[in-house]
Amino acid sequence: MTSLPASTERKLGLVIDLDTCVGCHACVVSCKGWNTENYGAPLSDQDPYGADPTGTFLNRVHSYEVQPETGPAQLFHFPKSCLHCEDAPCVTVCPTGASYKRAEDGIVLVNESACIGCGLCAWACPYGARELDAAEGVMKKCTLCVDRIYNDNLPEEDRLPACVRTCPAGARHFGDLGDPDSDVSRLVVERGGFDLMPEQGTKPVNKYLPPRPKDGWEGQVDVLAPFLAPVAEEPKGFLGWLDRALGALPGGDRP
């Protein structure tokens, strides 16, 4: 059972603006391109031009149409990737220590040379943020472009995750969410940023900003509220039991 750091010096993560995202998938394409050519094993595709194409992606955009009781239907785009949780269950279930959380910045990474492709981390992640690369047999996930943000060979303006640097709508923001005075932390406070599925108890670092009401579309923010509200006060059901059971194992460090 892999241990989590008691605390991290920083909490690097993303703030995603659901009001600004237009669902163009530029972040998906840039993520695929950068992570295929740089950090770790390439992100493979299987039969990409055939009848049943599959592939490995670290960032995906889901689109949902919501029909309110009154007024027009509204389309929302929901980008999703690893949330670099403070209490990351993908780390604590890893039997080899391949999945780990860095104490210096809070980024969750995978040591691919130690990964045996067992899939336990993908099973434990409540957000579906991990993918097993079929060609390499190792688990892949968002790295916050750790090979970009610390790369002194890049111009300073490029030392951002590829998805943030590429977003044409400015819907993605990157910074230290552990610093209350950082731009991203202030943005979360000003816009009422929220956690995804807080009832899972994972304490995701990444935050989402709710849509703003549009002129003439009264109550637009309320349209999403029922879908974003926590479904429980604390982890429950099978995942809650699993979390407690793993914490009770010898060497477990979870309450």
Image: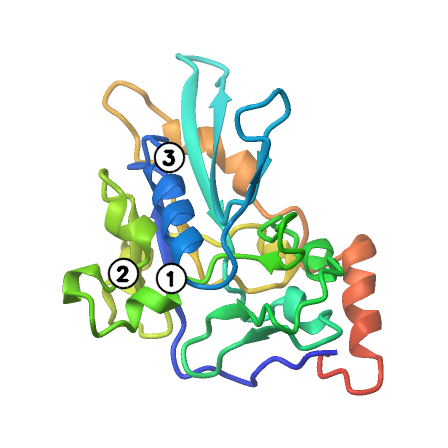
Q: Residue at x 42, y 46 (%)?
A: 32
Q: Residue at x 78, y 77 (%)?
A: 247
Q: Which residue is mark 3?
A: 25
Identify the mark at residue 160; answer none if there is no mark. Answer: 2
Identify the mark at residue 245; answer none if there is no mark. Answer: none
Query: Disc 1 and disc 2: Cα gap in Å?
Result: 7 Å
Q: Is residue 19 visible?
A: yes
Q: Say whether marks 1 and 2 touch (CB < 8 Å).
A: yes
Where residue 1 sits, quadrant-wise, is bottom right
Name above or below for residue 28 compared with residue 15: above
Which element carries disc 2, helix, strand or loop? loop
Name above or below for residue 117 compared with residue 61: below
Which of the two labelled residues, at mark 2 and mark 3, occupies the earlier sequence position?
A: 3
Q: Which residue is mark 1?
A: 145
Which of the two labelled residues, at mark 1 and mark 2, occupies the earlier sequence position?
A: 1
Mark 3: which amino acid?
His
